[in-house]
Amino acid sequence: VGGYQSGFKGIRKLTTAEVLNLDVNRIGIKRTQRFSGNIAWENGSEIRIAKSESDSLELSYVITDKSSKRNYTYEVKLDYTSCHYSNERPWFLCPHCGKRVGKLYHRDGYFRCRSCHRLNYRIQQEDIRDRVIRSIDNKIHRIQDKLKTERGLDNIFDIPKPRYMHLKTYNKLLDQLKELYIERDKSFMSILDSYKTKELEELRDIRELIVQ
Ligand SMILES: [Zn+2]
């Protein structure tokens, strides 16, 4: 268990970029694997995470204040969705509201989802991956709207033809959708690989601690 130094003070509204966050896709979680290790951030913060055989992650850390020292240990449940290229994509279930999210943010002692912390999310402060993926997602959503189907990545390969749509249009839209889906996955993987930040280096270390 590492020490923790709070990097944010004052009353101004925080943006997500200024807050310690945990990205489920950068930890290297696999459903059947157990592991434990530490995650450290550049400001000296450090937490311990451990995954048992159950589908949850245990977070533990200490927050020291001028006068007090407090231990935090709690579970974050995990969920998985099927993913075309890698087998399964992991998600956090926010420990506060239960919503399925890719990132948890630390504030006031706890890691929770963005909406639970009511964090201000500014486009210019999103990292590159978020921007690229989001722009692809927007294109995917527009096509899904045209096809009168639910937005999302779950049903991309199984969309019925809307009643009054020409077959030619329908096929064209499906092709575009599949291309975007492949593009999304490629961007995701290549940007993931290109991360050179200290944070990710730390996360890579954790991958090596994974116990089969
Ligand atoms: Zn939440």
Image: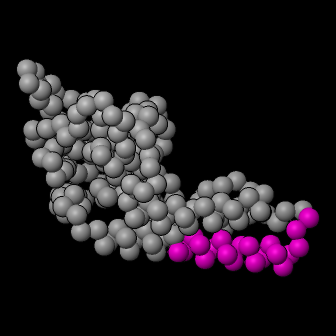
**Residue at point 50%, 54% (across, down):** 81
Q: Nearer the viewer, residue 169 or 19?
A: 19
Image quadrant where one finds the N terminus: top left
Question: Residues in magenta?
Answer: 164-183
Q: Identify the main secondary structure in magenta.
A: helix
The outermost residue toward the top is 67
Q: Nearer the viewer, residue 160 or 87?
A: 160
State how many labels appear: 0
Q: Picture coordinates of residue 149 (x, y %)? A: 74, 56
Q: Is residue 172 magenta?
A: yes
Q: Picture coordinates of residue 161 (x, y %)? A: 82, 66
Image quadrant where one finds the C terminus: bottom left
**Residue at point 65%, 60% (across, down):** 141
Image quadrant assignment for residue 50: top left
In this rendering, the answer to whether 119 lies above or below 130 is above
In this rendering, the answer to whether 99 lies above or below 28 is above
**Residue at point 44%, 46% (across, down):** 121
Q: How is the image coloured?
A: one colour
**Residue at point 30%, 38% (across, down):** 106
Q: Picture coordinates of residue 38 (x, y %)? A: 16, 49
Q: Nearer the viewer, residue 146 or 135?
A: 135
Looking at the image, residue 109 sits to the left or right of residue 117; the answer is left
Q: Is residue 89 visible?
A: yes
Q: Is residue 55 visible?
A: no
Looking at the image, residue 158 sits to the left or right of residue 43; the answer is right
Looking at the image, residue 21 sits to the left or right of residue 87; the answer is left
Looking at the image, residue 31 sits to the left or right of residue 175; the answer is left
Image quadrant assignment for residue 89: bottom left
Q: Is residue 81 magenta?
A: no
In this rendering, the answer to whether 204 lies above or below 18 is below
Q: Picture coordinates of residue 9 (x, y %)? A: 22, 33
